[in-house]
């Protein structure tokens, strides 16, 4: 197994961008180490919509005092720090910006303001393979077998065939899909597909594993099995995991830290630290109480306040049928 | 390792079962086809016997069969099929290469892509015979002229299907691939081409039938000295209807053969891999 680790380091070294921070494959299992893996500073993202004048007319670019562009603030000055090896879950209702945040971290979305540091280096300088994202639908390539899918990233990185075989088989064994190494993707069940997606991400030895509601489409039994596997993988590889979900129980059961996001404030509402050793009972009283606490918080998020003030502008939500987060500034 | 071997054994026995299933069904198909052909020849013989057309215009099936045997004996059949096939393979091959290259550049340069797209759709259904006078004047009354017509008739199908195939790839695959480090050429090679293969196959199949179509027409019009088109021409010149019908049947048979042997197999392979054949009951 040590030979595999050294190859893993080789992959990490190959993936190094312009950063001088050195390889991060550390054998330390001290999860309380102060190495900061992700630093998000004042991240904001806004969508601009069409001018609304009672009827839906097209965008008018003239800066007339009577025309107003509808802003949809997705993220508003979000700040977050995540340490190396932490298993962070981000939970919130649909539309709160959690998937957007993940896309920004993965490098898929580049239109935002603010600063992001990955392992000390600015995000532009760090290669995409440092932060591999696992999608809800898996996004496995249907024209490849399980083995070839997992092999994909290594093939792109031009690693030799023998070394690839070693690494790929190691991770296929880790997700317990050895019998299905040469099956086609359509022959797999949903849970198996996600396991392949996880293995496909892990072979590239990323610094951060980004998971966007990966188990949302799966049944409860499969999910529980996958929680187990994911936690074991986390123990084994000590990767930093950022796990987005809308399932509050899942978020609390899995994470070291559960971050609750809200669409109304377009950012982080509250953080809960779950200081429980693993393996955890899914119905542990602490988990249940934190889950209830988060649900209580969420109830607040759904009560529509008729008005609130931000940045000295009075927002009046006089159209309650609009989605949370879409507000019209009151004209002076 | 043991488990992988078991898996392989399982797969091969599954494959056997599948193909046995196929064999059983195609025996049934074979019976249907034979029946169909028998009925067809029966009607033909009837029309002949009833003298609806004079013997010179419509020979009996037997006469056509004799003509077949003649052509086989004096090697006309072999040489003409050979020559025609040779032109087809070259023309079609060049068509695919040009088509894929142009299709890929259309994706790379979106401005070019948009304009070329409408251009290609328009030219795709341009009648192949209409290219002939142009080819004769530009290139000449020779093989190169024939190839020109073949290429112009089929290349646009390949261009369009390559372009739309790549455009219609689910962006999820591209995102996932880029996230794993694929960019530029490796993105094209390892993601875009395989992902657009089902679409490209459709285009290549269509291009093939256009090419075959155009080839025989060009052989006739550009008066090729050897080839199936030439045999048709000679038949008309000397009023040898039996030879004409025999060559028509040959042309039809080759088209059919190519489709069953080459394209269907290819399509089947792709559909099996992608799991697209799961919805159909066997």
Image (tube, rainbow, N blue to C red):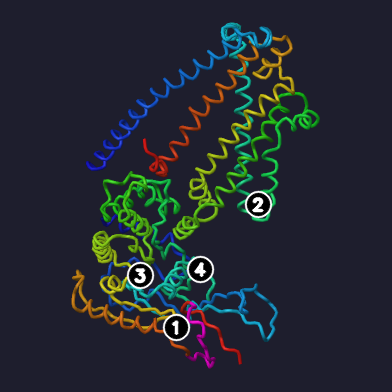
**Front-lying residue, A165 or A136:** A136
Q: Which residue is mark 2?
A: B113
In the image, residue A243 lies at what x, y percent? 35, 69
Q: Earlier in the sequence, mark 1 or mark 4?
A: 4
Circle 1/circle 4 CB separation < 8 Å:
no
Residue plotted at (40% across, 68% down): A22
Labels 2 and 4 positioned on one and the same chain: no
Question: Label 1 is found on which chain of the structure?
Answer: A
Labels 3 and 2 positioned on one and the same chain: no
- Say above or below: A47 vs B233: below
Q: Nearer the viewer, mark 2 or mark 1?
A: 1
Residue plotted at (74% across, 32% down): B131
- Say above or below: B184 vs B162: below
Left or right of A47? Residue B155 is right
Mark 4 to mark 3 CA distance (whole Å): 19 Å
Secondary-structure class at tag 3:
strand
Question: Label 3 is found on which chain of the structure?
Answer: A
Labels 2 and 1 positioned on one and the same chain: no
Task: Tell me if residue A27 is in the magenta stretch.
Answer: no
Residue plotted at (72% across, 9% down): B238
Task: Tell me if residue A311 is in the magenta stretch.
Answer: yes
Q: Nearer the viewer, mark 1 or mark 4?
A: 1
In the image, residue B257 lies at what x, y percent? 52, 24
Secondary-structure class at tag 1:
loop
Q: Which residues are magenta?
A: A308-322
Labels 4 and 3 positioned on one and the same chain: yes
Mark 3 to mark 2 CA distance (whole Å): 40 Å
Q: Earlier in the sequence, mark 4 or mark 3?
A: 4
Crowd around label 1: few <14 · some 14–19 · many ≥20 (10 Å): some
């Amino acid at each position: 197994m040590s030979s595999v680790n050294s190859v893993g380091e080789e992959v990490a070294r190959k993936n190094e961008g312009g950063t001088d921070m050195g390889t991060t494959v550390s054998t330390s299992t001290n999860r309380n180490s102060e190495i900061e893996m992700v630093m998000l500073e004042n991240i904001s993202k806004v969508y601009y919509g069409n001018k609304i004048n009672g009827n839906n007319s097209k965008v008018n670019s003239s800066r007339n005092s009577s025309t107003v562009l509808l802003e949809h603030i997705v993220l508003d000055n979000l700040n977050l720090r995540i340490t190396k090896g932490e298993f962070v879950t981000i939970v919130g209702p649909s539309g709160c910006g959690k998937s957007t945040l993940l896309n920004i971290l993965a490098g898929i979305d580049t239109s935002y303001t603010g600063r992001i540091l990955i392992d000390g280096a600015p995000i532009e300088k760090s290669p995409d393979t440092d932060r591999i994202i696992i999608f809800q639908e898996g996004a496995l390539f249907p024209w490849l077998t399980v083995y070839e899918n997992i092999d994909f990233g290594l093939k792109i990185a031009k690693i030799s065939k023998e070394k690839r075989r070693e690494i790929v088989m190691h991770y296929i064994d880790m997700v317990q899909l050895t019998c299905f190494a040469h099956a086609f993707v359509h022959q797999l069940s949903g849970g198996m597909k996600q396991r392949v997606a996880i293995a496909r991400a892990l072979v590239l030895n990323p610094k951060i594993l980004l998971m966007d509601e990966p188990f949302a489409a799966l049944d409860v039994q499969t999910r529980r099995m996958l929680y187990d596997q994911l936690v074991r993988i986390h123990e084994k590889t000590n990767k930093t995991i950022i796990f987005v979900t809308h399932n509050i129980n899942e978020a609390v059961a899995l994470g070291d830290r559960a971050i609750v996001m809200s669409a109304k404030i377009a950012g982080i509402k509250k953080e809960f630290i779950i200081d429980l050793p693993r393996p955890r009972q899914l119905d542990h009283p602490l988990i249940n109480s934190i889950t209830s606490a988060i649900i209580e918080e969420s109830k607040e998020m759904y009560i529509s306040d008729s008005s609130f003030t931000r940045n000295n502008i009075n927002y009046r939500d006089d159209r309650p049928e609009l989605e949370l987060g879409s507000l019209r500034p009151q004209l002076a | 390792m043991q488990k992988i071997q078991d898996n392989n054994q399982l797969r091969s026995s599954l494959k056997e079962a599948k193909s046995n299933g196929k064999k059983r069904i195609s025996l049934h198909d074979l019976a249907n086809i034979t029946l169909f052909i028998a009925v067809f020849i029966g009607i033909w013989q009837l029309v002949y016997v009833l003298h609806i057309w004079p013997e010179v215009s419509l020979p009996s099936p037997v006469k056509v069969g004799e003509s077949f045997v003649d052509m086989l004996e004096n090697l006309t059949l072999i040489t003409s099929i050979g020559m025609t096939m040779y032109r087809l393979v070259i023309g079609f091959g060049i068509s695919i290469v040009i088509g894929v290259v142009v299709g890929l550049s259309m994706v790379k340069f979106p401005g070019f892509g948009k304009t070329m797209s409408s251009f290609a759709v328009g030219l795709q259904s341009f009648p192949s015979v209409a290219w002939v006078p142009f080819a004769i004047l530009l290139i000449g009354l020779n093989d190169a002229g024939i190839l020109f017509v073949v290429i112009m008739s089929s290349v646009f199908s390949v261009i369009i299907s390559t372009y739309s195939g790549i455009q219609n790839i689910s962006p999820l695959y591209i995102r996932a691939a880029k996230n794993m480090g694929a960019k530029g050429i490796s993105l094209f090679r390892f993601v875009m081409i395989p992902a657009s293969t089902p679409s490209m196959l459709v285009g290549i199949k269509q291009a093939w039938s256009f090419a075959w179509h155009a080839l025989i027409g060009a052989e006739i019009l550009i008066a090729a000295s050897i080839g199936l088109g030439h045999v048709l021409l000679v038949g008309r010149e000397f009023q040898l209807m039996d030879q004409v019908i025999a060559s028509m049947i040959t042309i039809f048979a080759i088209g059919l053969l190519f489709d069953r042997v080459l394209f269907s197999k290819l399509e089947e392979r792709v559909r099996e891999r992608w799991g697209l054949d799961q919805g159909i009951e066997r």
